[in-house]
Image (tube, helix red, strand yellow):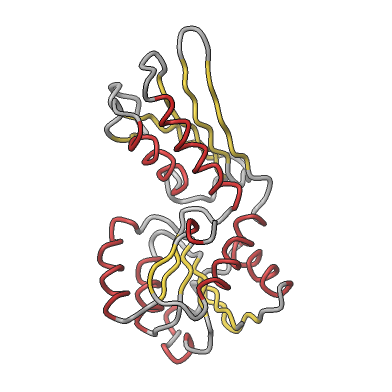
């Protein structure tokens, strides 16, 4: 499989290493130095494009891929406010899009645990739920896309929570404490606290390999398919 990479930072290099190990070829690497000169003809050299750029560039990159009718796997977050527009474009162009806020198998299992726990805890109003997410200092979006997914899962199950916020406020808001320090790949903690005890679940990534492997597996899955897919289609 011929792969193009939109974004060639640490994640892009990790994806490249895993893709090569799995027998694929990386035919195009796109970053800030050459993004303005890339044409649809260039993009069509790839069987699939894996997009891990920045929240500021991701939306235009997705559009370029769909317009070129090349399947695209999107790992960058910060564009989901425009999801309906992208969904419409994908349908119009008969495109192929795989998106996820996190490609790690462990995180996606954690999503299921989080949803189940929130459903159980909805009966017990004595517990106050909050979240903490820790990432490296280079991460641009706050809170992380993974944290937002976790928060939305909790809000869908906990009746007293109406929305999430990175500011402590009234009890209707689910507080997300976002921390940026060092080179932390990603840690997400869900806490239920009461006067008598605490319940806590955590996912802690040790490195970027799990995210990169998931992205390559998603690219393999997407080849030959049309429409929009997520990690739930793989798991």
Quadrant of the rendering where the N terminus is positioned: bottom right
Q: Nearer the viewer, residue 38 or 234?
A: 234
Where residue 200 sits, quadrant-wise, is top right
Give the residue at x 60% y 68%. Answer: 216
Above or below — where is 43 with respect to 106? below
Percent from the top left, x then y, of residue 176?
41, 33
Q: Nearer the viewer, residue 105 or 4?
A: 105
**167 left or right of 132?**
left
Above or below — where is 123 with respect to 226? above
**76 left or right of 13?**
left
Percent from the top left, x then y, of residue 122?
37, 25
Give the residue at x 39% y 17%. Answer: 124
Percent from the top left, x then y, of residue 69?
39, 84
Quadrant of the rendering where the C terminus is positioned: bottom right
Percent from the top left, x then y, of residue 2?
59, 83
Q: Residue furthest bottom?
A: 41
Give the residue at x 60% y 66%. Answer: 217
Above or below — where is 135 with respect to 195? below
Q: Residue furthest top?
A: 196
The total of numbered circles placed on residues is 0
Give the residue at x 39% y 40%. Answer: 153
């Amino acid at each position: 499989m011929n792969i193009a990479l939109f974004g060639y930072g640490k994640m892009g290099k990790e994806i490249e290493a895993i893709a090569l190990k799995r027998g694929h070829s990386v035919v195009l690497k796109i970053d800030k130095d050459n993004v303005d000169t890339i044409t649809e003809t260039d993009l069509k050299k790839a069987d699939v494009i894996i997009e891990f750029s920045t929240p500021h560039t991701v939306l235009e990159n997705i559009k370029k891929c769909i317009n070129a009718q090349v399947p695209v796997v999107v790992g960058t977050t910060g564009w989901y406010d425009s999801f309906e527009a992208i969904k419409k474009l994908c349908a119009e162009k008969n495109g192929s899009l795989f998106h996820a806020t996190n490609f790690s198998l462990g995180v996606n299992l954690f999503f299921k645990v989080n949803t189940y726990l929130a459903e159980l805890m909805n009966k017990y109003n004595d517990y106050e739920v909050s979240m903490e997410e820790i990432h490296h200092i280079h991460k641009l979006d706050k809170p992380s896309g993974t944290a937002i997914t976790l928060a939305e899962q909790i809000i869908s199950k906990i009746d007293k929570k109406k929305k999430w916020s990175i500011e402590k406020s009234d009890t209707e808001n689910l507080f997300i404490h976002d921390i940026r320090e060092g080179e932390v790949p990603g840690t997400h903690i869900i806490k239920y606290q009461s006067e008598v005890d605490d319940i806590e679940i955590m996912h802690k990534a040790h490195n970027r390999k799990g995210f990169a492997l998931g992205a390559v597996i998603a690219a393999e899955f997407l080849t030959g398919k049309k429409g929009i897919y997520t990690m739930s289609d793989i798991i």
